[in-house]
Image (tube, rainbow, N blue to C red):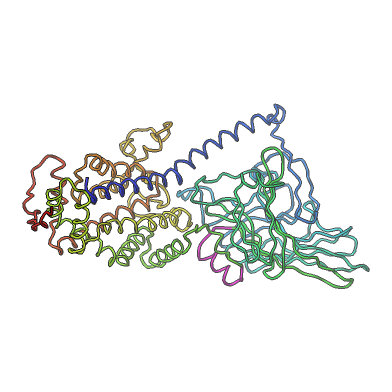
Amino acid sequence: MNSEDTRNLFLAIALSVLVMAAWQYFYAGPLYQKQHQAQLQEQTQAAQQTPAAAATGAVKEVGVSPPGGAPAPGVDATVKNVPQALADNPRVAIDTPSVAGSIDLRGGKLDDLVLKDYRETISKQSPLIRLLSPSGAPDAYWTTTGYVGAGSVKTPTLDTLWTSDGKTLTPSQPVTLTWDNGEGLVFRRVISIDDKYMFTVADSVENTGAAPATVRPYGMVLRHGKPTVSGYSVLHEGFVGVIGDGGVQEVTYPNIEKATNRTDTWSGAGGWLGFTDKYWGTAIIPDQVEPIDARFTASGTVQPVDYQADFVGPEKVVAPGQTVATTTRVFAGAKEVSTIDNYGTKLGIKKFDLMIDWGWFYFITKPLFLLIDIIYKFVGNFGVAILIVTVLVKLAFFPLANRSFQSMAKMKKIQPQIAALKDTYPDDKMKQQQAQMELFKKEGVNPVAGCLPMVIQIPVFFALYKVIFITIEMRHAPFFGWIKDLSAPDPTNIFTLFGLIPWNPTALPVFGHFLALGIWPLIMGVSMFFQMKMNPEPADPVQKSMFAWMPVIFTFMLGTFPAGLVIYWTWNNTLTIAQQSLIMKRAGVKVELFDNVKKMFGFKTDTAATATPAKTPPAKTS
C-alpha cells in the first residue's frame, strides 16, 4: 500500500467515523435517551401516585415566590382542561394580529396565550400553538411581574384580585390593572402589547399613607412540570438568559435539579431570562440599567416539578405622596429571527438574539441563515434558496477547490511514474518515499489537496443542519412535490413501497430508525455513489470495500435527517461532480466516472485512453 493509498484509507476512516459519531451524538443517542427518560418518568409517576390520587387526579400545586418572599397561595387544585381553568377567574382578553389569549385578574398573571400564525402540524385544520396555560391546567406555564415588600409592607400576591379599566388588550388599547392594599398603597399595572410578541408592563406604587414604604420590583416565569423536549444535543431547550455583561446561560431541566439547592443564581445590570423551546420562548426583561439578582430554580419533591426563572431589582423607597414606577417587558412568542433581532436592537436588550440557539459556530450559522433568508425573499421558496446558497458557497471556495482538483488531476497523470518507482526501489521504502516526494515537488502535486473540498464541506454541512433544525422560518416550509416541510425527514419510505403497505417500519426496535428511507435520501445516495466513482478504485481490498459501502451507509443515515439537509447534500454532490469533471478535462485527464461504473458491473473499459507514458525514473544507485 503506497502513501497515497494509506492517506486515502485514513481519510475515509476519519470521515466515516466523524459522520457516524456525529449522527450518534446528534440523533441516535438523544433519541434513545429521550425514549428511555420518558419510560422512567412514566414509571416514577406511577410509583409515586397513590390509588386515591390516581382515581381523582388531584395534585398539590406547590406555592412559589420570587426572591424577597412574595406570598404565594399554595392552594390545592384539581387538574382541569384549559377552558375549565380559564373559567375559574375573571379575565382581560388579548387580541392582536399575532396572538390571542387573556390575562388572569386573579394574580394579574399572563397565563393564556396562543399563536395565531402557527399550528401544530402542516394541516390548516390542526390546533394553533398554545404557548402559555393557566394554573390548574396540564402543563401550566405563566408569567407575572410586580413588587415584593420589605418588612411588613403588604404587596399583591398571586391570589390578589385586580380590577381592570378595560376588557380587551390590543396593540392600540392598553389596559390598567389596579389594587389598593387598604394600608395607603395603591398598585397599578399598565399592560400594553405590540403587533407581535412583546408585552410592556409598567408597574407603579402610589403612597397615599403617612409612612414611607420600601418595595423591590420582580418578574417571574413558571412552568409546572417538565415539558416535552426534542432531546437533541444540537439544540438547547430549558432555562436561558443573559444577566449583565456575561454570556448566555443555558441550563437544562435535569441539570437544575442537580444544582446546589436546585438553584443557579447570577447578578448584573440588565439582561433577560426565561425558557426556550425549539421554536418558542418566554422571557422577562428587566430595566437594562438597574442591577438585578436573577435565578433559575426547581421546586417540589415529586413530579411534576415547578421550574422557575425570576429576578428581583433594587429596593425603592416610596415616600408619602410619591409614586415609584418600574417597567418590565415580557416576550412570549415564536422565535422569529428578524423579530428577535429587532427587539434586541430597538429596545436595547442585551444579546437578545441568543434566545435562538445558534451554537458555538454562531459566526457561521447565523450569517448562513441570513443569506438564505435574503434569497428566500426573492425566490419565495426556502428549498430553492438553499440550492442557490450551495452554489454561492461553491463559488466562494472555488479557488481552493480548483487547486485541489487540479492537484488530484496531476496525481492521476503521474500514477504510472509512481508505479515505476516501486519497481526501481522494490526493497527500499525510504528511497521510494524520497523519490515520490521529489516527483510530487517537480510536478507541483500536493498529496493532501484532495482532502480539502471534503474538509471544507463539513462545517458548512453542520451549520446548515443547525439552521434547518432550529430556525422557525424552516418549520413547515415546503419545497416541491411531496416535501411539505424542509425541517422534517422525507415522508416517503421505500420499505412501505411509498405508502402502499400500511405499516411503520421505523417503529421496529433496535434498527427501526434505519428504515426511514425516502426518495430524497435514495437520490442523495446515488449522487454520492457517482461522486466517489469519479476517482479510480483503490487497489487495496479494504479501501475498495469501504468506499463501495460508504454511499449505502450515508443513505441510511441521512434518511432521518431534515429533508432540506438531504436536498443540500444531493445538490452539493452534483455540483462537485460537475466541477471536478470540468477541471479534469481542462487538465487533460480523462473523467473515469462511466468507466468505473462499467467496471463495477463487469464491463470492459478502454484503459488506453487513461494511460500516460511513464517518464524514465531516476537511475538506481548502488
> Residue 113, position in %: x, y?
62, 54
Tell me which corner region of the image, top left, top right, bottom left or bottom right, holds residue 213. bottom right
How many dots with numbers? 0
Image check: 540 left or right of 112? Answer: left
Residue 196 in the image: above or below residue 424:
below
- Nearer the observer, 211 or 131: 211
Residue 518 in which image quadrant:
top left
Residue positioned most to the front: 622
In this view, 401 is above or below 538: below
Q: Is residue 578 visible?
A: no
**Quadrant holding the N terminus:** top left
**Does residue 345 show up magenta in the picture?**
yes
Is residue 291 something one can see in this rendering? Answer: yes
Horizontal relation, residue 297 to residue 490: left or right: right
Q: Residue at x 25, y 64 (%)?
A: 403
- Classify residue 617 as left or right of residue 293: left
Q: Image height check: is 84 above or below 94?
A: above
Q: Residue at x 27, y 59 (%)?
A: 449
Magenta extent: 333-349
Nearer to the camera, 77 or 598: 598
Q: Is residue 604 above or below residue 148?
A: above
Of the pair 176 and 327, the residue shown nearer to us: 327
Magenta stretch containing residue 376, yes or no? no
Picture coordinates of residue 157, whole percent (x, y): 80, 54
- In percent of the image, x 68 and y 42: which residue is there? 305
